Amino acid sequence: MSKEMAPPPSSFGKGQRGKPVVKPKDMKGTLRRLWELTQGQRQGLGWLMLLSAVASASTILSPLLIGTAVTAIDTGNPALQLLILLAALYLTDWLVRFLQQFFMAAIGQRIILHIRSTLFEKMKALPLSFFDSRQHGELMSRLTNDVDNISTTISDSLTQLMTYGFTIIGILCIMLRLSLPLTCIAFISVWLIFLLTRTITKHTRKLFAQQQQILGKLNGQVEESISGLNMVKAFGREAEMTEQFEESNARLCQVATKAQIWSGFLMPLTNVINNLNFVIVAVVSGILAAYGRISVGLISSFLLYSRQFSRPFVDIANIYNNFQTAVAGAERIFEILEEEPEPADAPDALPLTAPRGEVEFSHVTFGYQAQEPVLKDVSFRVPAGTRVAVVGSTGAGKTTLINLLTRFYDVNSGSILLDGRDLRQYRLQDLRRTFGVVLQDTALFGMSVRDNISYGNKDVLPERIRAAAKTAGADSFIRRLPQGYDTPIGENGAKLSGGERQRISIARALLKNAPIVLLDEATASLDVENETKVQGALSRLLAGKTVLVIAHRMRTVAGADHIVVLENGRVAEQGTPAELMEKGGLYRRMVELQSHSAQWQLNGNE
Ligand code: UTP
Ligand code: MG
């Protein structure tokens, strides 16, 4: 089925009439890929097909049997055998439908399990740059909603479609055999229903899409009002907030009512057509019977068939729309599966067991978008076991240095060397093990404090966790928490203060005991007194390791062996703190500015 096909009559039936349909871009290609995903379940699908054929056979045969029984009774012949056969047929029908459900549930869920794990595996392997340019909520919806859509479609629609396919063909054959003129009448009514559904759903589809859009807006407003309620109150914007909400709410009411009314037309109108068809078939067949052209039994069979004939058409329209939406969802999933993963290690990638810890940036140029370099020709060296500080104004590219070192991103040109070799020559996993990182945006998980600190370090002794927490200045506040180290800290540590979160992530990095430590504004949320304490403990503990510190507060970096000043992505100056003070450049200006403002604050507090 290609996209240039005329739009089918839209949805009809259980509460889904005219739901907005998302059209797939490449139906054939996506279906082929979906089919590939069913590998391993083909046998089950074969069984399902067989069951569908049996199910439709029983649907098709029963009116014929009823008709024959009526004729038998009408002509005074025994009909008991026929009735027993009919009962057996109904029983088979029930059993087959049950088995169909059983197979479908099992197959559908197994396929979905496979898709979901493949997708998750893929997301794990994707480079961070992939996530930068996408809304996270949207990606999550692919993992949940889109996959769910496929699942429902596979388990509901597929069985129905198979059964209907067999049923329509079977019934058509029998109806044609029974009577050509009556079949023509039945066909006209099916055609009318088809046209009617198409006309009405063209209209309702627009309305439902509008409803969806307003609902999305309303959700956004509610979410924003709740999350920003303190600001709303602080700026006294309650009245405006309510007004905006009321406006959207009223619009939603209006559009939803229209949509419901329109879609409500469909069912009764279809019934009218169906009933008219029934009457016309009855009248015509009555006339034919009066002339002795057909039997009474044939009439009852035919009437039942014509009813059964129109039903699949109405349902198929609905199923087809759901099907399109699911295929479009599958397309979004395949889009992710096709993304380029993080480059794999070269076959000759080097292991990295005991690095000395010498880092060198050599003429590094890099941009998150290739045409907009963030770092330009950056070169500096961090000898093993020394402490290098990077300073510079906000947006200068400091965090970017860490993103490159940990190979979250790769340089565009130039190279970064670890122990004299390009980072890209090492096994990625080994490389990442080499760094203990405290990122500027602390990322914690919704588990206990203990699990957060020992993250990635299984079976670590409680004493070591405690020691790390002590060095990070976190032990005392953790012990004051209701369940101490076992207290759950909420999503991304929501129950903790900014400084508490930072200290936990410092403890986590310390526990990793990696040879190179990267601290990006690791103590920026702490007050001066606590920062001094934590920095002191850190420098004692990290003595002998290679440390890269990024900080805004000059006091934090004063103890470094070497200082690199970044300005607009370029190294503006570098040297020991003393050298840079003497030089009287940017660094000195920053130091003086900060001691000035500190002085000013002190005076102001007096
Ligand atoms: P950095 O994040 O490296 O700046 O971004 P910084 O020096 O650490 O700044 P502060 O002190 O933490 O505030 C450098 C540039 O890279 C861009 C930013 O907009 C900034 O101009 N950038 C950063 C991106 O384009 N994409 C990203 O994912 C991150
Ligand atoms: Mg930064």
Image (tube, rainbow, N blue to C red):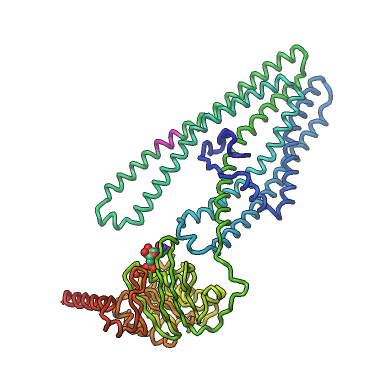
- Residue 308 pos. (x, y %): 67, 30
Q: Residue at x 72, y 30 (%)?
A: 171
Residue 71 visible to the viewer = yes
State which quadrant residue 195 falls in.
top right
Considering depth in this image, is 197 or 408 the residue closer to the camera? 408
Relative to 459, does residue 407 appear above or below in the rendering?
above
Report the span colored magenta.
253-258
The majority secondary structure of the magenta stretch comes to helix
Q: Is residue 433 left or right of residue 78?
A: left
State which quadrant residue 13 falls in.
top right
Considering depth in this image, is 1 or 297 the residue closer to the camera? 1
- Residue 53 pos. (x, y %): 74, 40
**Magenta-drawn stretch contains 376:** no
Q: Residue at x 53, y 53 (%)?
A: 142
Q: In which quadrant of this rendering is ligand 1 seen?
A: bottom left
- Residue 489 pos. (x, y %): 43, 69
Q: Residue at x 29, y 57 (%)?
A: 231
- Residue 271 pos. (x, y %): 58, 27
